[in-house]
Amino acid sequence: LERIEEYKNDLEGLFETQPLAVLATHGAGQPYTNLVAFVAGKDLKVLYFATSRGTRKFANLSADSRVSMLMDNRSNRVSDFREAMAVTATGRAIEIEGEEREEVKKAYLVKHPHLADFISSPSCALIKIQVESYYMVTRFQKVIEIHVRL
Amino acid sequence: MNLVISLERIHEAHRAGVGGKGYALAMMAQEGLVVPKAVCITTEAYNEYVDLTGIRGQILLELQRKSFDDMRWEEVWDVSLRIRHLFMNTDIPNTIKGELEDGLEAIASTSPVSVRSSAPGEDSVKTSFAGLHESYVNLKGRDRILEHIRLVWASLWSDRALLYRRELGLDLDRSAMAVVVQEMVFGDRSGIVFGKSPVDDSQAVIESVYGLNQGLVDGTIEPDRWELDRSTGEIISHLPVVRERSLEPAPEGTRVREISSALRSKAPLGRKEIREIFEISQTMERLFGAPQDVEWTFRKGALYALQSRPITSPSVSEDDQRPWYLSLQQSFQNLKSLKKKIESELIPAMEAEAKNLAQRELKGLSDHQLADEVNHRVKVHERWLEDYRRYCIPFAHGMRLFGQIYTDRVRPKDPFEFMNLLVGTAMVSTLRNQVLEDLAARIRQDQALFRSLKEHKLEACDPEFKEAFDRLIIQYGDTTWGAERFAQSAERILKLLLEMASRPPKDPPTGFKGKKRLEERFFSAFTDDEMEYAEEILDIARASYRLRDDDNTYLGKIEGQLQNALSEAKNRLKGRSDVDNPSMPPEEVVKALKGRHGILKKEAPVKEIVATNTDFRMQARQLIGQPAGPGVAVGKARIILNASDLFSVKSGEILVCDAIDPNMTFVVPLVSGIVERRGGMLIHGAIIAREYGIPCVTGVADVTSLVETGDLVTVDGHLGIIIIAKDGRQSIPSKSRDGDKETGH
């Protein structure tokens, strides 16, 4: 029997090993994607990334907080069709501040130490995605959904 | 490395690139032994071909559908068939074709050749690939040779090779194949010598047949056998056979011929020739440093060594599964005799057995006698089960052999096109379903009958209907699946009939509509000479296809009689609180009836472990299986875990089950799609789905726990995937289903 724990382990493994994710937002109905450096919360219920407040994605998020984010471990070889995993997370984004920001910043810098200047800049927002669902794709076509109870 | 190397130029560094057979031949030639002229097509050529054509990636896609370790051999066969199809339909790109042609020039400009597999790694005593890959003999002309080189390459992915490499844990991604193209030597007598007998270290063994060696190697022709003293070469014993046939060259390939009466009474080898062959085996052993298995042939008195390989060491071969993998491949001759045995002996005997058992009155037996009867029926059932494994399962290869022949001759786009020629051959389950369909039609037309059946008044209804219904019960009532009998309750069958009556009538399956045309296409690919063979192989394939379903039905009847005795016993034991246990195994039932039971506790039903995690909820959205019946269907899932699920199926639902037993297939005319955990094209679920033209996906791991009754399921029988919508949203827009089955949900 397929166990949810196994899938959660897979998610954790992927989130630890992949530095970058593709973030999708939209502006007036126009989808828009970016590469962002991310880190996952310990409980798998939240994902974090950072962005300057002047960016298009920040503007998009301010108008509509719904986001989708793709994380995968492809190597751009044919073997990806057998071995790669891609996970789409959907949920809502909010900027975090104060103590929470300081806590998350620590975890973020453990994963992305070279981004210390970037994340410490006053113009940089640290964004939390409250995940509602994960869509995990393996073996090219196998899709498993993991829904987070809110 | 070059793409082609001639035997004289091969040295140690080429060993991996030319494979075991090629390297051994080169050593033999360089030692001055008489071997046919040959060149090796190196693994480099294979690698270039699969990279330039993209086949390497396609193989990977075929193998990724599910974990290779989880595939059953039937699924492995399907994968292997699709891969072979790729090689067959993909020409060698011009960039490497030229070099191959130049290299072949040295040997194959005019004379016929054999094209043999030469797998790297075969020259080790630990692994023997003997018989796992293909070899082709007596081919003429550049194009035919190049085509068969592709087929030998493809045989790297044959089901038996895949299974064997899985067992050895070899890396599939790095597999490559070399090929030996060898001038034909049309020997009049051929055979094999084992420098050391696999069963007795002190002996050597020679096997010999008239004609070409291929007949001995593939098991078509039984050889004479000699056991020799390994130290002296003296003959210890000669085991002659009934010599009837030999394999001879045909215009292309080979054919089986009757041998003359003079040869029948004469052993193929004389004392002097046996000596000569034994000496060759000794020379080879010295040359390669280990006892060898050598194929040889005599042409006009001259002895040629065709190939040599080490004998797999006995310590390895003890738990070697290779013989079993090889048994999955049955020769045409074997299939012919299996067919005869099953049709004229086994099936009538099974029917008689079931009838005979049915005549014994159980009610009048004492507990003791009933216990003996249960014991007897267990033994009878076991005996038939063994025969079933021994004869009926191997016979399923009839379909596979036909499939290969059809595909080789007709060159269809769809590797499973041959299945269309097999459907509609009056299987027992299709006949039973027709009886059900007829009864449903009566109910549909007769309002009064419909009403009285709804009120469970079977006794009060039309006597003609009642009579027909009773006939159904008599004929099919005792078929079983698991511990269930079809006619366990008349009520359930009536429920099924009412459901069938409430949907519009359905035409009986007529098989594939263009069958006649396909049949013509198949036969037109053979010469007049070969027509008898073509007809026979189609006949075998149809019998194999039909029997795949039928033999189970007959076995199910015998099992039904065992269940009858068991349920009589369990009825009697009911109320005796210490032994009242519905899932008690037969041996315990017998003990209990004889009053010698220990105290048995009722087993608590095993509760399925359901994936729960308080904060997360998992659900499957899209699952991968194998495409087993083309078409797309959308409908509500009906998970079949027990008989009552089966009898609850509603018209238009998608049947989701672990494995379909032919005795369960009475619901198939009601459903719009079939999804099965067990995988393969030759399994009952896939066969019956094709028969009824219902989309079908097989081999979906864990499907009965990942899908729930009522989920909206899309069965994509083209791609071999299913899509699940828990919230009832249709998963694909109806536009993309144009031309496919329209089904309600």
Image (cartoon, coloured by chain):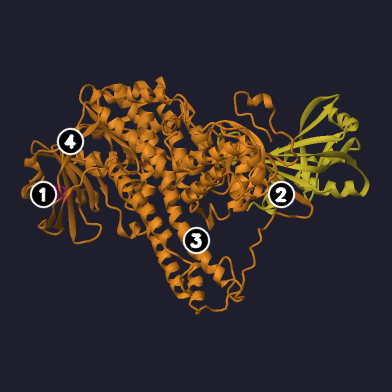
- Name the amino acid type tagged 3: Gln
**Which residue bears the numbered disc 4?**
B257
Residue B478 falls left or right of residue B728: left
Q: Nearer the viewer, residue B453 or B61?
A: B453
Write down the chain letter for disc 2. Answer: A
Write down the chain letter for disc 4. Answer: B
Q: Where residue B92 sits in the image (x, y, percent)?
A: 40, 24
Distance Cα–Cα, label 2 vs label 3: 51 Å
Label 3 residue SS: helix
Mark 3 crowd level (few <14, some 14–19, many ≥20, 10 Å Cα):
many
Q: Which chain, by letter, is orange?
A: B
Please tell me whether residue B330 belongs to the stretch shown in magenta.
no
Q: Is residue A80 above or below residue B285?
A: above
Label 1 residue SS: helix
Q: Are the two marked residues, 4 and 2, in contact with CB atoms closer than 8 angstroms?
A: no
Write down the chain letter for disc 1. Answer: B
Q: Where residue B563 sits in the image (x, y, percent)?
A: 49, 61
Mark 1 crowd level (few <14, some 14–19, many ≥20, 10 Å Cα):
many
The quadrant in which residue A113 appears is: top right
**Which residue bears the numbered disc 1?**
B274
Please tell me whether residue B280 belongs to the stretch shown in magenta.
yes
> Which residue does the image show at 32% across and 39% down from the upper left?
B118
Same subunit, labels 2 and 3: the answer reads: no
* Disc number for residue B563: 3
Labels 4, 2: front one? 4
* Disc number for residue A12: 2
First-in-chain label (4 vs 1): 4
Q: Which portion, as a residue range, is magenta?
A: B274-282
Q: Which color is chain A depicted in?
A: yellow
